[in-house]
Each structure stands twice: as structure tokens, then as C-alpha cells.
Image: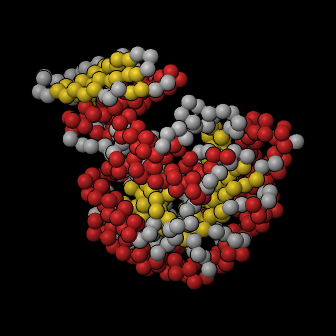
Amino acid sequence: MQIALSKIGFDEFSTEIFHIHRLFFEEANIGAEAAADTELLVSLRLEEDEQEARGYADLSLPGGSGSWQAGSVRVFGAAADRKAIRRRAVLSALLQALQQMTGLEQPWGILTGVRPTKLMHNLLQKHSAEECRHILEEQYLVSETKARLLIDIAERQLKVIPDLFRLDGEVSLYIGIPFCPTKCAYCTFPAYDIRGNNGSVNGFLAGLHEELRQTGAWLKQAGLKITTIYWGGGTPTSITAEEMDALFVTMHEALPEMGHVRELTVEAGRPDTITPDKIRVMLKWNVDRISINPQSFTQETLDAIGRHHTVKETVEKFLLSREMGMDNINMDLIIGLPNEGMTELERSLAETEKLMPESLTVHTLSFKRASRMTQNREQYEVAERDEIADMMERAIQWTEAKGYVPYYLYRQKNILGNLENVGYALEGRESLYNILMMEERQTIIGVGCGAVSKIVFPRAGETADGAPQRIERFANPKEPNAYNQTYQDYIDKKRELLNEAYAPFVRQAD
């Protein structure tokens, strides 16, 4: 869709305006002036005074064959929120006009970011739950169903972690192990064939041990404790049981007060990597939670997306883990995988019911730019928008009927149906790390290949909407060879950033 957009004075909202168009037109190209191939003319304007703003959107087809107009509700707020007020006014007018034109309703309204629950927490600090619902529905055009979902999740998170907003004196740790048996077609995570030539596993592990030691030394010097630890990747259980055991030894030798850690998770997502020896290692070191991820219980789907394990193997490894003593297991399912519809989802839910994992994350397929699936999209047939929505609704009904409650949520670009990914858990089995990682109220230090640190500057104050004033993202190299050659440089740079963030805190500790 070639779009000519007139938005004088709204350049600061260009990215958000583009994302609103993309909700309706996947291949939207936006220019400032009409051209010969222009398919839609869009004009945006704004009326405002010191306390409120109202946006207007006019859409028309070249040649006068159709036109649509919409005005936003009046958006109120304090002077300090002026930019946010203007943004909401303009975007809500544009969204309503596009909904009129296309007939597509967007349940998330003008929210296009990854973490809508962050907004919910910020609102709950100032308003009642019912007031928050009205704000989301009227100011952000979020549907009542999604608004209530956000409220439920935010309240659940505060029940699970009552000190969620008081954890900037601790950190959590993410350990990235970038190897998998094979790479799934939809995946863009650092995940390299452990049998391939992307880098020496031994070389990588040597660097990871050193990064753990130096990270632990910094934490001890800073006087900071660890709240949660998460082994991710890749698939950490791709390495051998002996290699896993050695990493646990280094963790316990290097990191401060391991007895204080509230949760230790190991992502064992690929069933074909799980062995009795690896389970014994995890039990030995008191791993609290693992993930065994089927994604689908249809064998043809697993073959199509490059997961070289069988449905039978998923069940067998789950039962093996349970029999050996793993009592907190997560499973992932993905809605919208190639050639899957309601029949396949029902099969996956029926098989999941036989196992009853303690938690279940229901993802909606996202066409990530760098994935093999996106680069060869014509080879993969996926369900239409309405069927995706029906499948998500069925998953919601199933989880509620089985006693699972939603406890974290995030969204992605190019996600099918403009929907969401939701983590569900049985009472008391919610993942603390998932909550902390999504809400960005605590520093997550990433070590290992492809690990991303998100450093929340403590005691730096908050923005007008209640969010932390400064968050810095620092990524380690994704590719094992690059990590092996440069990990010390990245350790040094990350330590400099941590020293800057925690300088006031460290001085007080001294």
C-alpha cells in the first residue's frame, strides 16, 4: 500500500504513525507527497490547549472514490505529559479512521509496543483498577477484554512479587548458551547447530566461565544480591551433563549468596536434548523450574518448522523429568504455525491436558524479519486473522477451565492477528524471572553468547508515567566465534556501564 501522509508538526510521532498503518497494511510504504502510484491519502491534524488535545484524521482514495474521517476523544493530562497527550490524540484519530476504512477492529488500540503491562503498572500506581480500565478503553482505544487482561496480570504480578518496584538493590542474571540441535524456521534467537562450525563449544564455555567469575566479583564488590537466574539460549541442555555441572560449580563459587536466589530456571526447550544425566545435574544444583517446549503436538508441523524431535519424544521426556523429581515444568505452544488451524490446536491442548505442566506459555506466531520463515514466507501457509483470533480465544477458555491464570504478557512486531503472547500458570507456579524481565523494574545482567543486559539505573527517579528514568541495553556478541574472540572487551564495557549505574548505590554500601 503506497500512502501519502500529511502530518505537519507530528514528526516526533513518525514511528508510531507508521506502526499504526502497519496494523492494517502489512506492506505499507509512506511518503510525504502523493505520487502516481499513491493508493491512499492521509491527513492528520491536531487541536489543543494547555489541558487537552483532540486529533483528526482524514483518509481518501485518489480520484475521490472513497473517504473516511475520524476525531479522537478529548485527551486530558498534566502539562508534564504534553507529548504523550498529543501522541494519543493523533494516533487514536488515525486508528479509528483506518478501522472505518478497512472494517478491521484492533483489540490493542493504539498500543503497538512490546510491554503493555508496563503501562498498566504505571496507571495502577495513580488510579483504581476501574479507572485504569476506562483510561485504556477511552484514551488508548484498547478493548474491554484486553484492558481487563492487563489489569488481571498486573495485579497477579504484584501478588507474586510484592516488592516488584523495590528490587533495584538486587539484580537478576541471564545466562545465554547459543547452541541447539537445529534452528527452527521461525527463530531469530542466537541458536547455532552445536555440531556446526560457528564456534568452538569449548572456547565458548571457557569465556562463559570467565564472564561468570568476573560478574560475580563485581556483584560482591557492589554488595548486590541476585533475585533470579535464567539459563536461556539457544537450548542450554544442548551441552553435555558434565559441561552443565561445571557451569553450576562456577556459578556457586563465583556468585554472591546463592542461597538468596528466589528462582533458578533452565530452558530445556528441545526434548531431544534432555537426558537422565542432565536431569540429575539440575536436581543436584536445585534447579527450580525447567521448560520443555512442544510448540505443537502435530508431527507434520514439527517437521515443517525444523524441530527434529517427535511428539512421542516430547511426552516421554516430560514424563521422565516428572518421574525423576522435576515438579515445576513449563511448556510452550505456538498458535498459527504453518498449516495449523483449530483442529491442530485442539490436539495440542488435549495432549497438554494429559501432562498438566505447572505453567504454559501460549505464543502467537510472529514473522520475525531475520527468520527463515519470513525470508521464505511464500513456502508457509498460515491461518487467516479471524481463525487466529478464534484459536487464541479457545486457548484462553482452555486455560481458565484447567485452573491456569495469566501472569505475564508481551507482544511482538508482525505478530499474527495483532494479538499477544501470554504466560499462564497454576496458582503459585508463576515464573519470577519472566515477570522481572518483562516489567523492566530491575537490572538483568546478561552473560554468555547473545545475552542482552538491561541495566535499570537505580535511584535515578521516574518519568511522568512512573517508569524508570533510564534503562540501558547492552548486548553481547550473538555469534560464538565473535564471543570467543571478544568476550573480555564486552565484560569490561559492561562493567563500566554497571559502575556508572550503581555508583551511588556502591558508595553507600561502602
Q: Can residue 163 be seen in this view?
A: yes
Q: Which colour scheme is used?
A: secondary structure
Task: Reply above or below: 478 against 350.
Answer: above
Rendered-image quadrant of the N terminus = top left
Q: Is residue 177 visible?
A: no
- Residue 158, x across and y down, in percent: 57, 53
Q: Nearer the viewer, residue 431 or 475?
A: 431
Q: Residue furthest bottom?
A: 323
Task: Reply above or below: 110 against 252.
Answer: above
Q: Residue furthest right?
A: 510
- Residue 30, x across and y down, in percent: 32, 28
Q: Which of 176 and 8 is in front in this view?
A: 8
Instruction: Locate residue 304: give its quadrant.
Output: bottom left
Q: Report the label total.
A: 0
Residue depicted at 19% across the width and 25% down the height? 60
- Residue 78, x across and y down, in percent: 49, 24
Residue depicted at 28% across the width and 38% down the height? 25
Task: Reply above or below: 327 against 396.
Answer: below
In the picture, measured across the screen, residue 250 lies left or right of residue 239, that is right
Residue depicted at 57% across the width and 83% down the height? 323
Q: Nearer the viewer, residue 276 or 358?
A: 358
Instruction: Locate residue 96: give its quadrant.
Output: top left
- Residue 156, x across and y down, in percent: 52, 56
Rendered-image quadrant of the C terminus = top right
Residue depicted at 42% across the width and 30% down the height? 15
